[in-house]
Every structure is written in structure tokens, then in C-alpha cells.
Amino acid sequence: MTKFSDLTLHDVLAGLEAKDFSAVELAEATVSAAEAAQGDLNCFTVIDGERAKAMAESSDARRARGEAKLLDGVPIAMKDLFAVQGVETTASSNILKGFKPEYESTVSGNLWNEGAVFFGKTSMDEFAMGSSNETAATGPVINPWRAQGSTEKLVPGGSSGGSAAALAAGISYGATGTDTGGSIRQPAAFTGLVGAKPTYGRCSRWGVVAFASSLDHPGPFGKTVKDTALLTQVMSGHDPKDSTSYPGEVPNWVKAVGKSVKGMKIGVPKEYRMDGMPGEIDKLWTKGVEWLREAGAEIVDISLPMTKYALPAYYIIAPAEASSNLARYDGMRYGVRVEGDDLTDTYEKTRSAGFGNEVQRRILMGTYVLSAGYYDAYYVKALKVRRKIFEDFNLAFEKVDAILTPTTPSAAFGIGSKADADPIEMYLNDIFTVTANIAGVPAISVPAGLDASGLPLGLQVIAPALDEAAMFTVAGAIEEAAGFTAKPEKWWG
């Protein structure tokens, strides 16, 4: 009997084509695994067995007619930020409890059009605001990984931690996420997965609950670089409903995986070697450089001098945009409504009850930096820094084809160990990832090793805008050299 949890997306496609199992059998196994794990991992907000079975039946019928599509029969977990028509979509917030959109997000629609099977929505940090998946209204998501000899519950990373946990636990075969400052790449590193953020505009943001509109990047998680390339390819494409959507054709990125990096120039930015960086992270980065050198790439030392300003700029721009985007949640049209003595009191009570602490903190920060007395001092200055960071990358990519850095400053940490102590310490988790969001360039995290406690660590590849092919080629070379096959030892239901 096939052990479904061990299969990659491409394994699933091969098994379906060979008739080793049907899409219905796979969907039923996936739903059962999701329901069994939910009590321990808390990674789903919705599990929909009926819809999964119906979509799988349609997939089996298409395959029987010889009309199978690119992802036919593959169960995909959807982050609860993507609107799925008729399915509760809450962004893991109380303020959207009970909201069922009458429309489909463009990204999820692209997946269903290629035959993917919906089976569940995954939990996330509320409105994607967090780096640990502890701010969800439904409680923290638990990482399937544990440190050796320990039963401590670890974070899966955020904000797309539910998707990462579901895939790492072998429940799903691909998953969607959004990346505003590292929310795909950081969870991927924490859970031993591949996570990609394509160029800004490659994947439509239409039907995706907005956090910070100029920084939000939909993207996928996969078990392999090849799986992730295929998912990115299907999710991408021009969308007239999104004014920032890139109008060009979507290349075949699967073909880029496995290509030689011989002759490619890989940049190593000196600014990413920071004081206090754990020796394990530095050692892994050095190892990654050697892997690419041995594969025939030329290593080039580069400078990204504005890197040190990226995090402060991000935590001005993102909350500012969030405070504007979240103004629409007032209890008037949809979601939770708490009646007050008058209209203003209703607004205040609804938003106080509906938003969690982290979301309220960021709305307040954003409102402050946009206020009349501080707009020029903070927000306008942050936009100028953003432009400088963008120029840094443009200059670097005149010399190199891609950049290699660590993904995160540490492995997964314990639930409550940072969020409860100091929000700033939590924000520092995005230190290696935010620059790519600010510049809008594609970036990917690849699992490359384990720390001393047996927890996964990732390396990040950043490529020029619209050159996802280079990103996937370099990522594939790292994946091959690293030979990462570790999986979490099963302890969940």
C-alpha cells in the first residue's frame, strides 16, 4: 500500500498517471490525515472532505478521458488569506469570523483550473502579521518538528505556518502562502521545506486579504524545488483584476530545475554576516558557497550597504499600509459586529473585539507614521530608503546572476519564547528576508541542513526581478548538493 505522506507532488502525479491510486483515494487519505493531525498541530481553519471528494471525482474522470491537467488530483492546502468561493475565509481573525466570499481568488482559481484538489484552509498569523504563527485567533500552530530528545512545542514560523506545518507533516503535497517580509521563506526554513516568493506582480493579489499591498507576494511551498517551480508556474500569470500584475508570459520554470550553474556568478553579501549570528548558520552559509563553487559557479563578494536599514523601513511601510487596508473592517458589511451606543462606539467595540494584540499594535504604528506630524519624518523617509535598497540590488545584479544568504538567523524556537517577551525580538526573525520584499525581487528558501538539535535550517537564493529561472536553477543545485532528506519523526495524530 502506498504511504501517501512520503510522496512529493511529482510522485503523486506519477502515481495517478500509473493508476497506482485514484484521486478520490488520495483525497480521502488527505482529509483523514488532516482530521487526525488537527488536534495536535492546529494547522487548519477549515477541512472540507465533501468538496475534496467532488473535485477528486472530477479529476479522475478527466484523467480517464485522457484530459489530465498539470496538477490533476493533487491536494493543495490553501492559506486562509486566499478567498475560496463559499468557504469561510477569516485571515485567522475574529473580525472576519463567518465570512464566506462569493468569489474565488485568482491564485486559487489558477490551481483549480489545472486540476488541483481543495481540501482545507490553513491557519496563519492574524492578517499575516507575525513570524511564528502564534497570533491566530484559533491559537498557535505547532511545528511537526521537535528538537532531539525534547517534547517542547516549536513554532512553524509565520505568517504562513499552517501551510508549512501541513506540508511538513505529509498531509498535503503543496501549499500556498503569502510573503510580505519572509512569511513563506521563514516557515519553509523552520519546517524543512522549499518556499518561494516570486517577483512582485507574478502572482495576482486579487482575492487575497491584504496586509501591505506593495509588499504582499503570493507564492507556494513544496517538498522539492521541482514541485515548487511547478506550483509557482501554475499560480502565476497576468490578471486584469490586479493593476500590479505583470503582463508577460509565464516561462516553464520546471525546466530550469536541474540545469547546471556552471559559469553563473553567485553573490555573497558581506552585510549579511551580522554580529551575534549563530555559528551553525554561518557554517551552513559557507557550505552553501562551497557547494555552488564545486558545481562550477563563480563566487563574487558583493555589498548591499542599505541592508541594515531594511528592517526599520519595513516596519514603517508595512504597518502604514496595513492601517489603511484594515480600515475596511468595521462591522458594517461583513464579519463580526459588536453593537455600541452609537456609530463610533460600534466601530471601537467591533475593532477592539475583532483584532488581536499584534494587529492592533501594527494598526497603531501605521496610523502614527501616517499622521500629519510624522508622515515626512517616518513614512516618506522609509520610501526613500526602499528606493535605495532597490538600487542596491540593481547594482549587485549587474555583477552577479543570483545572491546566496541564510534564510533565518536561527532554527525554530519554542512557542511563547519570543512573542511573549519582546515584539522587537520577533521582528528580527525577518532580518534576512525583508530586503527581497522591499525590492520586489524573487527569493526562495531551500532546506540545506540540520542544527545541533536536529532542526532544519535553510539557505536563501535571491535573483533579479523576473528571473525566477535563475532562482530555481541555483536552488536546484543547492538541493542536489545538500541531499536534504530529513523528516520530522511522527508524534502527532
Image (cartoon, helix red, strand yellow):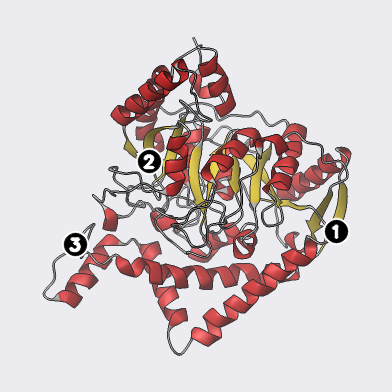
Q: Which residue is mark 1?
A: 301
Q: Which residue is mark 2?
A: 121
Q: Are marks 3 and 1 in contact (CB under 8 Å)?
A: no
* Residue lying at 61% horizontally and 48% vertically, measured from the top left: 249
**Nearest to N terminus: mark 1 or mark 2:** 2
**Nearest to N terminus: mark 2 or mark 3:** 2
The answer to which of 120 and 441 lies nearer the viewer is 441
Q: Which residue is mark 3?
A: 337
Q: Residues within 10 Å of mark 3 (few under 14, many from 20)?
A: many
Q: Is residue 147 above or below residue 139?
A: above
Residue that extends furthest to the top in the rendered view of this protein: 1
Q: Are marks 1 and 2 in contact (CB under 8 Å)?
A: no
Q: Is residue 373 visible to the viewer in this orientation of the structure?
A: yes
Residue 281 placement, left or right of 52? right
Question: Which of the 4 image quarters holds residue 15?
Answer: top right
* Residue lying at 80% horizontally and 43% vertically, measured from the top left: 287
Residue that extends furthest to the left in the rendered view of this protein: 341
Residue that extends furthest to the bottom in the rendered view of this protein: 373
Q: Secondary structure at mark 1?
A: strand
Q: CA distance from mark 2 to mark 3?
A: 23 Å
Residue 246 placement, left or right of 392? left
Q: CA distance from mark 3 to mark 1?
A: 55 Å
Q: Residues within 10 Å of mark 2 (few under 14, many from 20)?
A: many
Q: Quadrant of the C terminus?
A: top left
* Amino acid type assigned to the residue bearing label 1 in the image: Asp
Q: Position of residue 25 (x, y in %)?
A: 40, 17
Q: Position of residue 88 (x, y in %)?
A: 29, 45
* Discs 1/2, front: 2
Q: Is residue 26 visible to the viewer in this orientation of the structure?
A: no
Q: Secondary structure at mark 2?
A: strand
* Residue lying at 36% horizontally and 34% vertically, measured from the top left: 38
